[in-house]
Amino acid sequence: MVSLHDMTDLLTAIPGMLGFVPERSLVLVAFEPDSARIGASMRFDILLEGPGDKLLSPHLLSVIDHLGAVCEQQGFGDVFAVIVDDRHDGQSAVYRRVFTAVARALGPTSYLCVGVVVPQMIAGARWTVTHATPEHLGDTGVIGDPLISPMAVAQAVIQGRETHASRADLARSLSPRDVEDCSEPTCVVHGDRMDLPDLAPGELLAEAITVIAAFDGTQTCWEREVVRQALAHIHVRDAMMALAVTGLSSRAEQVYTDLVRALDGPERAPAATLLGHLYYVQGHGGMAGTAFEVALASCSDYNLACLLDSALARGMHPRELAGIIDYSYDLADEFGVTLPAPELDWAC
């Protein structure tokens, strides 16, 4: 059983795990078998219907069944469930039905150890235990500030990544923006294509990696065009996917984000997809899902985004993408380019 102190810490850490503060959501935190190590965190909208929003929608029940199947497939042990919703009292029968559905959906290896309701994920919000063993039903406490939790601070300091105030705020961080006028006569964001030298795939890959390695917070239009053309070349793009597990991952994330925001239309899809892939392999499923949504909204049949988004929806663990990374390194070798060594622990 998670202690009251642990529950407060875990609830406060959830926004840092997801990359944003959830609203009207069902969040599951699944632990590795017989371990305090978190195996996965999953979030979906909590869709209620009927008079007074007192009925569980068929879609919500389908989502819960899917989450249960994911926990079974991955062999998770204890599951910690959180409802973030302000429509009913914490002890409402509506929420109890949600937790009952979660408990039933879990396979024989997983167990819903506790279900908690909190109206909002903000500092001082009071949480209530609605599903647990009898002696813990009704337990309550107050969460800390999720934006300055150790998890959020670690994200900001180590990975240079902020915890967004909401999922909508995260989506807005990838929305197109006006790029200030530049003095370059032709550029990727102001109508005309820049005339880059006719580069072989290996040369294009090397140039793109050089741009990413030198990124200091801003990019010239020429640098954006180098990365855009690299991502438009399927095999070069596939080789660049390995950057997600290297020491260049943070800079690659910023470069892809900048390009997603600088471009418009279908050309946003490759950068948004590699951004989502980077989040995915690093265990940030919520952020990956948002990036894939942007990619597919830009180009609904962009194949790589479709494949990765489907894998994420099926609950495929990030370590199962290791084969893609191996392929990326093999491609780079064929191009005569030496990529930085992987630093991500695939055992995570």
Image: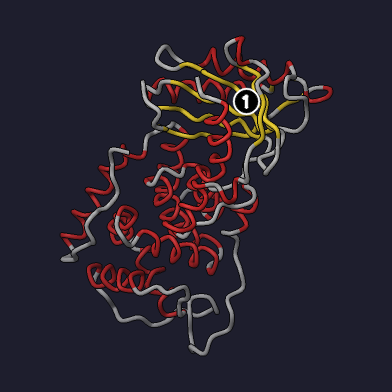
Query: For the point 47% across and 42% down, which residue is it?
Result: 285
Q: Viewed as shown, does residue 78 lie left or right of 347? A: right
Query: For the point 22% across and 68% down, which residue is it?
Result: 202
Relative to 55, say whether 7 is above or below: below
Colouring style: secondary structure
Q: Looking at the figure, which quarter contains the C terminus?
A: top left
Mark 1: give few (<14), some (14-19) or many (20+) Cα within 10 Å.
many
Q: Viewed as shown, does residue 169 lie left or right of 270? A: right
Determine the secondary structure under disc 1: strand
Query: For the point 52% across and 50% down, which residue is it?
Result: 152
Q: Viewed as shown, does residue 273 lie left or right of 249? A: right
Q: Which residue is mark 1?
A: 116
Q: Quick one: which residue is furthest to the front in this view?
A: 5
For the residue pair 270 and 24, the one nearer the viewer reads as 24
Residue 236: x percent and y percent? 29, 62
Q: Quick one: which residue is furthest to the top in this view?
A: 134
For the residue pair 336 and 229, the one nearer the viewer reads as 336
Relative to 195, say whether 104 is above or below: above
